[in-house]
Amino acid sequence: MTRYIIMRVLSTIPVMVLVALFVFLMLRLAPGDPASVIAGDYATAEDVARIREQLGLSDPIVVQFLRWVASLVQGDLGTSIFSGKPVTELIGQRIEPTLMLALTTITFAVVVAVPLGTLAAFRAGSLVDRFVMLFSVGGFSVPVFVLGYILIYIFSMTLGVLPVQGYKSPFTEGIGPFLYHITLPSVTLSVIFIALIARMTRASVIEVLEEDYIRTARAKGQSEMKILTRHALRNAAVPVVTVIGIGIALLIGGVVVTESVFNIPGLGRLVLDAVLARDYPIIQGLILFFSFVYIFINLIIDLSYTLLDPRIRY
Amino acid sequence: MTDQATQPAPGAAAAKDISLARIALRNRGVFWGGAVLLVIALFAIFGPFFVQDPTALNPINRLKPPGSEGLFGTDMLGRDVFSRVINGAQVSLVVGLFVAVIAVALGLFLGLIAGYIRLMDALIMRLMDGLMSIPAILLAIAMISLAGATLTTVVIAIVIPEIPRVVRLVRSVVLTVREEPYVEAAISAGTRVPTILVRHVLPNTIAPLIVQATYICGSAMLTESILGFLGAGIPPEIPSWGNIMSEGRTFFQLTPWIIFFPGICLAVTVLAVNVVGDGLRDTLDPRIARNMR
């Protein structure tokens, strides 16, 4: 068991190195001289030379990569070209809204999707089931931002019950204003997760309901409610948790778009602003940051399987 | 991150007879989804000949509501939104189709090698793990901003993050097929590796790949519109649905239809593609029909 945990933790290292290599090579393989790409269209020869010097672009590529990885290991994601601030500092400034949006979205999605999927499985073939399946196909087909604008149109512009955009911190501005502003973005972003998780919950509960121990539980006269909560849901947990892990990738993409629609000053906005300003160290740093978050969350999920299902032993 | 290699190959046995017409008649999803797609494709191909120039400016009639000036109204430069949406359909379909074909072709190639040649397996699969860890949208945004926004770079930027899933799927099929008696027979008869791959392994991957390709097509159209919407996609002078919606953002509170019309068209198209995908999956592969994709 301990051995498995150690091996699993170590296995993230080659993946992280590969991600770093991809991100590193991306800038080098782009057409043209990286220094002049970074400097932009209106740069002078001195600007290009300065950036070349700053990034150490004159050294052999292997040396450049190793030096870059060495600074990554020390927690240095690079320095913004325009503001001159370390990328880690910029991430620190912007992470709260993104984290809050992600947390509220996942919470809301799980709270809605798991009961919905369970109900659909329990009444397979019924009207509820059809609705859930329809919703789960539809949820994958509407782009996040279109959904966001539809909700803004209904709740902000027509009914006037929720704000059009903005973000309020729960720590400095209070929990009330925070919830008031975060509701629409969270609901928007959670639709695709509700679709994903409800579908998975339904499939795995249906599978569990066919197991012998469910029949035994029914035979001994246990109530349907207890069968659901005590037997079906617990055993259906592993695939559901897995799909939440897969969903993290979707969430990261969705966060960028949702922050843009609702004008939330988080990491997504930081990326887009960096793209417009061609501030590549920020883009590079953020891609790495998000990739490492994804790898870390999936590590946690893999390790959590033993807690969720005692049958899984390594 | 979890290794899917141990799963049984979906649809390995169902590759015998794939006649699209027969499937369409048998499965309602394929029929209706296909019908909707056909209509959209006809609009995309022939529509541009019948509507006015999507880039023609008409500043006097700008931001006009639907019906008063053109079917879908006009945007902030007085351009006809209906004409732009019709032209945008072309971009979405082209991107979806190209991304699906290229991603499947590259994924098939890499997956066959990874699944059949043990030496390459670890290398290719670790590369795919790395690629899968990078958020697709961010990767695409970064590649496009580095390489410059054109239709080609957008297609490439959407293709690359889609490849790992195809490789995993193909590899899992290959791993089961290579244990089949007929493959062992071919090996013992001295058949060369490329021949075995093409004649015995490849046909088994076709059914699951067709299903996968439709899902990739749908997700590529969504990604393209997101990139366009964020201003990081196809150049703004091309009226793609994402670009139309991106330009509609500024005036959303005044003229929400500029976002709603292309948004609805996009959602309907992607929905049709996904419904076809679900239908194909159910028909081609009854075994995984009850599970999710």
Image: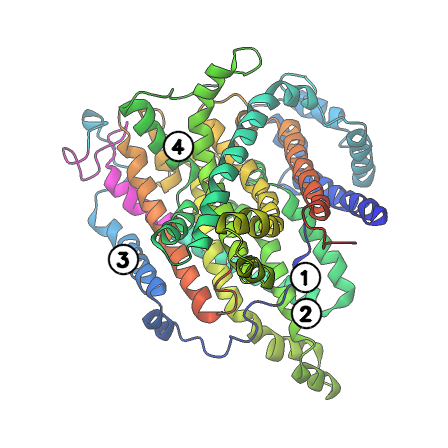
As helix, strand or loop, the secondary structure at mark 1 comes to helix
Disc 4 marks which residue? A148
Asked if the residue at tag 3 contacts the one at tag 4, i.e. Cβ–Cβ closer than 8 Å, the answer is no
Give the amino acid at mark 2.
Leu
Q: Indicate which disc, 1 or 2, sits on the residue closer to the N terminus.
A: 1
Asked if the residue at tag 2 contacts the one at tag 1, i.e. Cβ–Cβ closer than 8 Å, the answer is yes
Alpha-carbon span between mark 4 and mark 2: 43 Å
Left or right: A312, with B265 as reference point: right
* Count of numbered tags: 4
Alpha-carbon span between mark 1 and mark 2: 8 Å
Residues B170 and A215: in front is: A215
As helix, strand or loop, the secondary structure at mark 2 comes to helix
Q: Quadrant of the C terminus of chain A?
A: bottom right
Q: Indicate which disc, 3 or 2, sits on the residue closer to the N terminus.
A: 3
Disc 1 marks which residue? B5
Q: Are marks 1 and 4 on the same chain?
A: no
Occupied quadrant, residue A298: top right
Left or right: A163, with B8 as reference point: left
Residues B81 and A220: in front is: A220
Residue B150 visible here: no
Which region shows up in magenta? B66-92
Chain identity of mark 2: B
Chain identity of mark 1: B
Residue A237, percent from left and from top: 60, 48
